[in-house]
Amino acid sequence: MEGDIVHTTHYLSYCECYNQEVSEQSKALLVGLVLGDGYLSKPNGQSKKSYLDLKYDEKSLGYLRWVRKQLFDLNPSLIRRKKHYHQYRFCTESREDIGEIR
């Protein structure tokens, strides 16, 4: 499963929008993640878009991979490792329907 991890010092690369609707399962998972360790970005300016940013220690890498797979309809980025740290993260694309949850 190493193929879903990118080792980098760069923060995140955002994915292009495919305009796929968010499933009810993904919405429920997003709400649960935000109540826990997830972070929804603030919309910029007039935009109503937001994205999920999720990061965990490498001990929870299996869980992070599972969450990413569950949120596939939100076009998640690859999992990235923060250089010199034991931390991994990914983000979803920036979308208005995620901004509505925020």
Image (cartoon, rainbow, N blue to C red):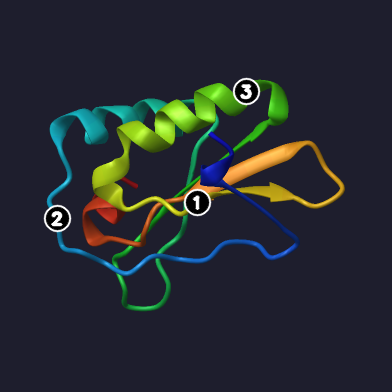
Q: Quadrant of residue 32?
A: top left
User: Which residue lies at the image location 34% right of the left edge and 47% below the top edge?
Assistant: 102
- Pick whichever, 78 or 17, lies toward us: 78
Find the residue positioned furthest to the bottom.
45
Name the residue tied to disc 3. Answer: 60
Q: Amino acid at mark 1?
A: Leu
Q: Is residue 90 above or below residue 18?
A: above
State the residue in front, 33 or 101. Answer: 33
Q: Name the residue at 40% across, 55% down.
A: 51
Please report whichever mark, 1 or 2, sits nearer to the chain's N-terminal start.
2
Identify the mark nearer the N-term, 1 or 3.
Answer: 3
Q: Which residue position is annotated with label 2? A: 20
Q: Residues within 10 Å of mark 3 (few under 14, many from 20)?
A: few
**Residue, x 62% and y 23% (percent of image)?**
60
Q: Give the numbered dot on residue 78.
A: 1
Q: Amino acid at mark 3?
A: Ser
| Image side of residue 76 versus residue 90, left or right | left
Displayed quadrant of residue 68: top left
The residue lying furthest to the right in this view is: 84
Q: Secondary structure at mark 3?
A: helix
Point out residue 59 in the picture as x, y percentages from the top left corner. Answer: 70, 21
Secondary element at image label 2 = loop
Q: Secondary structure at mark 1?
A: loop
Mark 1 or 3: the one toward you: 1
Q: CA distance from mark 3 to mark 2?
A: 28 Å
